Amino acid sequence: MRCFFVAVKSKGVFILRASRCTEGVRVEVEDHGPGIAAADLPYIFDRYYRSRSDAGKQGTGLGLSITKAIFQQHGFRFGVQSTVGKGTTFWFIMTDTDSSDN
């Protein structure tokens, strides 16, 4: 199974991918935006973390920490790859669950 969704707008490209892998289904969300600095990557899932480049922008720094908590509660692996000037890909792997409870 492979699913793709691509949106091209005046502000850039957004790509959503889902594909089967040995652990379950890997979902990727990719953009072709400014990217995230390597120095910020280890901290972006921390509560209230905001990079210096976000100064003056709205937000609380909670979005990715909430996402992290949800992924952890479900036992999903997750991560991010980013290159400044090229874009960012967030990913997570939805593991197969035991459907015998249904």
Image: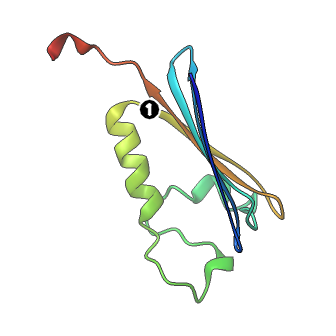
Quarter of the image containing the N terminus?
top right
Splitting the image into 4 quarters, where does residue 63 fall?
Answer: bottom left
Q: Is residue 63 left or right of residue 44?
A: left
Q: How was the colour assigned to the protein in this rendering?
A: rainbow
Q: Residue at x 43, y 23 (%)?
A: 95
**Side of 53 where 69 appears, left or right:** left
Q: Residue at x 52, y 68 (%)?
A: 49
Q: Residue furthest bottom?
A: 56
Indicate whether 27 appears above or below 52.
above
Q: Amino acid at mark 1?
A: Phe
Q: Position of residue 24 (x, y in %)?
A: 48, 20
Image coordinates of residue 2 in percent, x first then y, are 60, 27
Q: Residue furthest top?
A: 100
- Image height check: is 98 above or below 74? above
Left or right of residue 75: residue 82: right
Q: Quadrant of the C terminus?
A: top left
* Residue at the extreme right: 85
In the rendering, at what x and y percent does residue 48 appear?
Answer: 45, 69
Q: Taking 94 as reference, is 102 above or below it?
A: above
**In this view, which residue lies farthest toward the left?**
101
Q: Residue at x 58, y 58 (%)?
A: 43
Residue 32, x across and y down, in percent: 75, 59
Residue matched to label 1: 76
Residue at 33%, 18% (x, y): give it: 97
Q: Quadrant of residue 87?
A: bottom right
Instruction: Out of 49 and 29, give the one closest to the viewer.
Output: 29
Which of 34 and 13 lies nearest the eye of the viewer? 13
Give the structural element (helix, strand or loop) at label 1: loop
Left/right placement of residue 83 relative to residue 22 reads: right
User: Dot 1: few (<14), some (14–19), or many (≥20) neighbours within 10 Å?
Assistant: some
